[in-house]
Amino acid sequence: MINTILIISAGFISLALLFSLYRFIKGPSVSDRVVSFDIITISSLTLIALIAYISGRSIYIDVALVYGLLSFIGVIIVARYLERGI
């Protein structure tokens, strides 16, 4: 039962990742691309967490944490650049 729910949730997350990738490529403005990039990284983080749970390896959680921190810093830097320049 749990494996079925995890597989279905991985499918929904992958679908969200594909829609965000479309918006990243097709986005009319830079801010749309920044938001879609943030959604792509969040979707990737959840996929990494699902893989960690399914495989039973906690090292993937550490990888997800570092990836999340780098993503957060990247979005903050881009937002600052768009607001007033660096």
Image (tube, grey):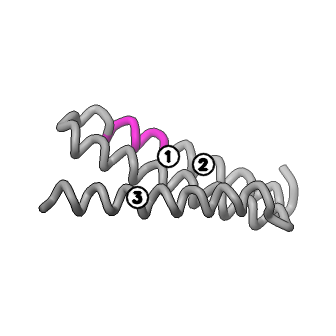
Asked if the residue under mark 2 is in contact with the one under mark 1, i.e. CB atoms within 8 Å, the reply is yes
Residue 14: image x %, image y %?
Answer: 48, 55
Question: Which stretch is magenta?
Answer: 61-68
- The residue carrying mark 3 is 11
Please say if the residues under marks 3 and 2 sit with CB atoms less than 8 Å apart. Answer: no
On screen, residue 74 versus residue 58, left or right, reads right
SS under mark 2: helix
The kind of residue on which mark 1 rests is Leu
Towards the viewer: 74 or 27? 27
Decide whether residue 57 is among the magenta residues. Answer: no
Earlier in the chain: of badge 3 and badge 2, it is 3
Give the residue type at disc 3: Gly
Q: Secondary structure at mark 3?
A: helix
The image quadrant that residue 34 belongs to is: bottom right
Residue carrying label 1: 69
How far, Cα to Cα, is label 1 from label 2? Answer: 6 Å
Local SS, label 1: helix
Number of disc labels: 3
Q: Which mark is residue 73?
A: 2
